[in-house]
């Protein structure tokens, strides 16, 4: 068991504090503190297992996608049997592994499934979940439709700054999933309001860089599992189970050589603002538009150097859209902030309170990027 983190519960601090072994506070602070060794090994193993099973479920559904599998939520975003199935599966696996201390903040709920006419779809989800749970012999269970609905609704926690909470986006990039493009199963763990662990399963992401010309060749395998624990770096493991490799963000210092990612969906980010920023930086390559937190995964291994997410006014970002991606990039040496340069705060419940948007890059490029973002925002505001 690797223990890299210590939790200090000190009378002089209002809340318990986490310290990495490399940054222990000096005495007398430590002498008056209760020290509890922290390890997230068990949580990481469970998260990888849950995300991998969910990824297999999603791959199966994407292959056989039927129009009737798509429902529309109140906000008009699509949700599929795979979103519900993935959430039920991850929720069930985590609850089995951590029965005494289980809290999950997740995107979906069972409200629409419980409406008249939902029974058939719930049965299909239940079959998918049972097939996936038993596929490799890890669980010898048969869930009922009610068990599945309850597992989905166990994701109703509000999160917050106290204790541990899992954060799940069962399919991030549902629109990409429906198009046959990129999507991700994104799972993170909050401890005391901070993201301490993240797993991103990206079933359609090529194992080689997105900047490689040969990425679309039929021999290029897809399916990447990224994982990171605070203080431990970021790793990428192919879905075929071969060894994980440590990844690092791009070391590019010259913005002219940087390529940047943004949402495929124009409605999810102000592409005109991103182009203004790119223009100011002198970025030459056109933006790479892909769906989901696969962008954070690709950036963590240096496929591109910048990710800009600048939603339209009034949109409130949810924690499950960024928690796993944020730790995957920061543990690979990158920086994730809002447009005011502040780190993302995952401790406030379901929503991130942000200034304007999210910017992601390496440490060298961040000052230049930040200035270009601020200037572009001001210019856009004064031209309105
Ligand atoms: N108008 C909007 N602005 C910004 N993000 C939006 C949005 N509408 C939906 N989203 C979020 O964008 C996510 C996808 O991100 P991306 O654009 O990077 O693929 C969606 O996740 P889901 O697909 O999990 O619903 C959804 O939460
Ligand atoms: Mg959604
Ligand atoms: Mg999402
Ligand atoms: Mg989703």
Image (cartoon, rainbow, N blue to C red):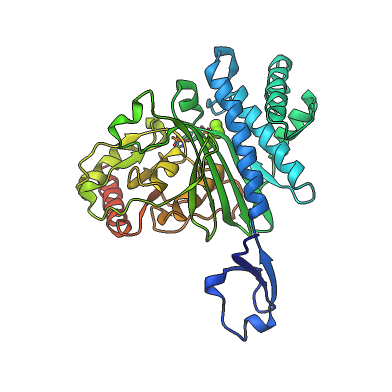
Q: Is residue 17 left or right of residue 356?
A: right
Residue 78 position by quadrant:
top right
Rendered view: 93 above or below 63: below
Which quadrant is the C terminus positioned in? Answer: top left
Q: Is residue 309 left or right of residue 14?
A: left
Q: Is residue 1 left or right of residue 373?
A: right
Rendered view: 16 above or below 314: below
Whether residue 357 is visible to the viewer of this picture, yes or no, is: no
**Furthest residue toward front:** 242
Whether residue 227 is visible to the viewer of this picture, yes or no, is: yes
Residue 86 position by quadrant:
top right
Q: Is residue 69 left or right of residue 32?
A: left
Rendered view: 164 above or below 140: below
Between 84 and 241, the residue placed more toward the observer is 241
Q: Position of residue 81 (x, y in %)?
A: 62, 22
Q: Position of residue 325 (x, y in %)?
A: 49, 46
Residue at the spot x=35%, y=47% of the render? 302
Residue at the spot x=60%, y=85% of the render? 27
Residue at the spot x=62%, y=86% of the render? 28
Between 195 and 36, the residue placed more toward the observer is 36
Instruction: Report the image quarter containing ligand 4.
Output: top right
């Amino acid at each position: 068991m690797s223990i890299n983190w210590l939790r200090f519960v000190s009378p002089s601090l209002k809340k318990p504090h986490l310290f990495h072994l490399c940054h222990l506070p000096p005495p007398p602070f430590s002498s008056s503190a209760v020290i509890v060794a922290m390890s997230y090994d068990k949580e990481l193993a469970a998260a990888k297992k849950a995300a991998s099973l969910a990824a297999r479920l999603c791959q199966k559904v994407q292959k056989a996608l039927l129009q009737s599998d798509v429902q529309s939520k109140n906000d008009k975003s699509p949700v599929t049997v795979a979103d519900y199935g993935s959430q039920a599966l991850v929720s069930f696996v985590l609850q089995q592994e951590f029965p005494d201390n289980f809290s999950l903040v997740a995107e979906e709920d069972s409200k629409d499934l419980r409406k008249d006419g939902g029974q058939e779809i719930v049965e299909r989800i239940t079959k998918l979940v049972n097939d996936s749970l038993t596929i490799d012999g890890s669980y010898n269970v048969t869930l009922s439709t009610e068990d599945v609905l309850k597992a989905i609704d166990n994701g109703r926690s509000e999160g917050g700054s106290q204790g541990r909470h899992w954060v799940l986006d069962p399919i991030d990039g549902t629109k990409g999933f429906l198009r046959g493009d990129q999507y991700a199963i994104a799972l993170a763990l909050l401890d005391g309001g901070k993201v301490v662990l993240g797993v991103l399963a990206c079933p359609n992401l090529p194992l080689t860089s997105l900047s490689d010309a040969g990425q679309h060749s039929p021999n290029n395998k897809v399916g990447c599992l990224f994982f990171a624990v605070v203080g431990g770096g970021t790793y990428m493991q192919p879905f075929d189970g071969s060894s994980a490799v440590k990844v690092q963000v791009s070391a590019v210092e010259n913005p002219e050589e940087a390529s940047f990612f943004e949402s495929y969906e124009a409605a999810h980010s102000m592409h005109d603002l991103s182009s203004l920023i790119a223009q100011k930086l002198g970025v030459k390559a056109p933006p790479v538009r892909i769906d989901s937190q696969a962008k954070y995964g690709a950036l963590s291994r240096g496929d591109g150097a910048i990710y800009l997410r600048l939603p339209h006014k009034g949109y409130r970002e949810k924690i499950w859209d960024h928690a796993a991606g944020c730790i995957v990039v920061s543990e690979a040496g990158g920086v994730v902030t809002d447009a005011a340069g502040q780190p993302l705060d995952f401790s406030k419940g379901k929503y991130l309170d942000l200034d304007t948007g999210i910017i992601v890059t390496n440490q060298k490029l961040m000052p230049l990027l930040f200035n270009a973002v601020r200037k572009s925002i001001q210019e856009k505001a004064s031209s309105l």
